[in-house]
């Protein structure tokens, strides 16, 4: 059992390193061009898992996987824009906590699930911590270049929650590695269509890869690694334990990295609020 916790923490560490490299690349790269290139390379790398997949799944499952990939495509683009124009030390803790909060709220509203007093208290604590994370007392500064990126952040977190719910139900009947390969393929296909309609298409992807080949390949490899590691660990432990543990490792590294690598401010305050949110999420989902 101990090795599963090691895998979960390792997944969080790798995810954090991937996010920090992504933030570095996005300082000088267009978010959409980066996302399209990243999605394509990730889909190719995911093919290594084909020998361990089982594609004998229903059309309903395929449809659900595509639905998740559609929402994930949007979140990929939004996340890249948020990282490019905002503080990763703010965005990362919110991405790690708010989508799970929204999943619980959606289940309460749509499925009639009952909440305990501890869960209600956790929701209040998370909402307060999110506000304090984004807006310092007596200041209207939010850590983002423009107000529209706050809206991107909010939309991103809502879509992450929707995709998370759909993925949860999909993984009841689809093997994790089968889901990973198909989802990454669909996301890459979606991004190819989007960049071809709005931007320079394959030519722009090729130019982007020629400039940032090494970091994009590194980010894609790390992404496939942390997802596969996490999925494997989930086979032997509960999501309510795995998710806060992985997110805790991710948040700790990205918040500290945001201060050390990108000069982001108020690190002690952000770390304290991050710990509060992760602990509250644990009590919310258990």
Image (spheres, helix red, strand yellow):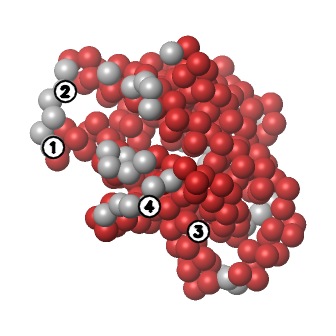
Q: Could you tell which of marks 3 and 4 lies nearer the N-terminus? A: 4
> Which one is in front in this view, the residue at disc 1 or the one at disc 4?
4
Q: Earlier in the sequence, mark 1 or mark 4?
A: 4
Q: Residues within 10 Å of mark 2 (few under 14, many from 20)?
A: few
Q: Disc 3 vs disc 2: Cβ atoms closer than 8 Å?
A: no
Left or right: 141 in relation to 215 = left
Residue at mark 1: 111
Which residue is farthest left?
A: 112
Q: Secondary structure at mark 1?
A: loop
Which mark is on residue 68? none
Of the numbered discs 3 and 2, the one sitting upstream in the chain is 2
Disc 4 vs disc 2: Cβ atoms closer than 8 Å? no
Report the Cα–Cα distance between label 3 and label 1.
32 Å
Marks 1,4: beta carbons within 8 A = no
Q: Quadrant of residue 181?
A: bottom right
SS for dot 3 = helix
- The residue that appears at 55% across and 73% down in the rendered structure is 189
Residue 117 visible at all: yes
Q: Which residue lies under the disc numbered 3? A: 188
Label 3 – label 2 distance at C-alpha? 38 Å
Side of 6 relative to 53 (left or right): right
Query: Does residue 255 appear in this view?
Result: no
Which residue was labeled with disc 2? 115
Foreground mark, 1 or 2, reads: 1
Residue 278 versus residue 174 in the image, above or below: above
User: How far apart are the two marked residues, 3 and 4, measured between alpha carbons?
Assistant: 18 Å
Q: Nearer the viewer, mark 3 or mark 1?
A: 3
Q: Are marks 1 and 2 in contact (CB under 8 Å)?
A: no
- Residue 90, given in percent of the width and then of the height, sits at 59, 37
């Amino acid at each position: 059992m101990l090795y599963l916790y090691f895998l979960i923490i390792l997944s969080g560490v790798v995810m954090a390193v991937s996010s920090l490299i992504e933030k570095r690349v996005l300082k000088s790269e267009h978010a959409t061009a980066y996302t399209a290139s990243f999605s394509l390379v990730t889909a190719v790398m995911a093919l290594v898992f084909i020998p361990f997949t089982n594609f004998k799944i229903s059309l309903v499952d395929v449809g659900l996987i595509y639905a998740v990939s559609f929402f994930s495509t949007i979140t990929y683009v939004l996340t890249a824009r948020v990282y490019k124009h905002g503080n990763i030390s703010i965005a990362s803790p919110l991405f790690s906590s708010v989508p799970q909060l929204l999943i619980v709220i959606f289940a309460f509203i749509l499925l009639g699930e009952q909440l305990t007093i501890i869960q209600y208290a956790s929701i209040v604590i998370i909402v307060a911590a999110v506000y304090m994370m984004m807006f310092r007392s007596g200041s209207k500064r939010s850590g983002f270049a423009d107000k529209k990126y706050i809206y991107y952040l909010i939309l991103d977190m809502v879509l992450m929650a929707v995709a998370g719910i759909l993925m949860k139900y999909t993984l009841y009947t689809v093997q994790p590695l089968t889901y990973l390969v198909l989802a990454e393929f669909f996301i890459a296909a979606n991004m190819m269509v989007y960049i071809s309609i709005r931007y320079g298409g394959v030519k722009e992807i090729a130019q982007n890869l020629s400039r940032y080949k090494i970091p994009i390949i590194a980010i894609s490899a790390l992404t496939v690694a942390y997802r596969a590691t996490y999925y494997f660990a989930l086979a032997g432990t509960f999501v309510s334990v795995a998710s806060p543990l992985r997110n805790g490792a991710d948040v700790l590294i990205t918040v500290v990295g945001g201060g050390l690598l990108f000069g982001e401010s108020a690190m002690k305050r952000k770390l304290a609020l991050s710990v509060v949110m992760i602990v509250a999420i644990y009590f919310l989902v258990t």
